[in-house]
Image (spheres, rainbow, N blue to C red):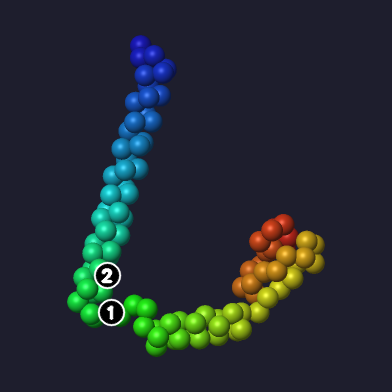
């Protein structure tokens, strides 16, 4: 009969290999996206950090925060976004 320790090590090893196998396609896609962004940046297709881009991004961020209503939890007083049904701190219903 196989000792329990060897069986445990074998099962954990198989699970780790399966997890690694599931992560490899995701990591490859992240790597490809990074290469594509770098290619666009160096070729001039995408200009990061220009004043117009910064102004647009800060204006859209300001608009998002202004339109997002805040709710205060009656139980703990934490501030939550209006889309939440439960408090982010104490998990009480809002």
| For residue 92, side relative to residue 81 (left or right) | right
The residue at which mark 1 appears reads as 46
How many C-alpha atoms fall within 10 Å of the one at disc 1: few (<14), some, or many (≥20)?
few
* Mark with earlier residue (1, 2): 2
| For residue 1, side relative to residue 76 (left or right) | left
Residue in the foreground of this view, choosing between 88 and 14 = 88
Quadrant of res 15: top left
Q: Residue at x 23, y 80 (%)?
A: 44
Q: Residue at x 31, y 48 (%)?
A: 22
- In percent of width and height, residue 57 lies at 45, 82
Numbered badge on residue 30:
none
**Picture quarter with the N terminus:** top left
How many C-alpha atoms fall within 10 Å of the one at disc 2: few (<14), some, or many (≥20)?
some
- In percent of width and height, residue 6 lies at 37, 19
The residue at which mark 2 appears reads as 37
Please report contact status of discs 1 and 2: CB closer than 8 Å, yes or no.
Answer: yes
- In percent of width and height, residue 43 lies at 19, 77
Most extreme residue toward the right, as rendered?
74
Most extreme residue toward the top, as rendered?
1
Q: Secondary structure at mark 2?
A: helix
């Amino acid at each position: 009969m196989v000792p329990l320790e060897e069986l445990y090590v074998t099962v954990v090893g198989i699970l780790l290999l399966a997890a690694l196998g599931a992560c490899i396609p995701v990591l490859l896609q992240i790597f490809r996206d990074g290469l594509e962004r770098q290619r666009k940046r160096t070729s001039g297709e995408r200009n990061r950090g220009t004043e117009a881009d910064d102004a647009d991004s800060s204006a859209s961020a300001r608009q998002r925060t202004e339109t997002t209503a805040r709710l205060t939890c009656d139980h703990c007083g934490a501030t939550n976004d209006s889309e939440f049904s439960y408090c982010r701190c104490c998990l009480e219903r809002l």
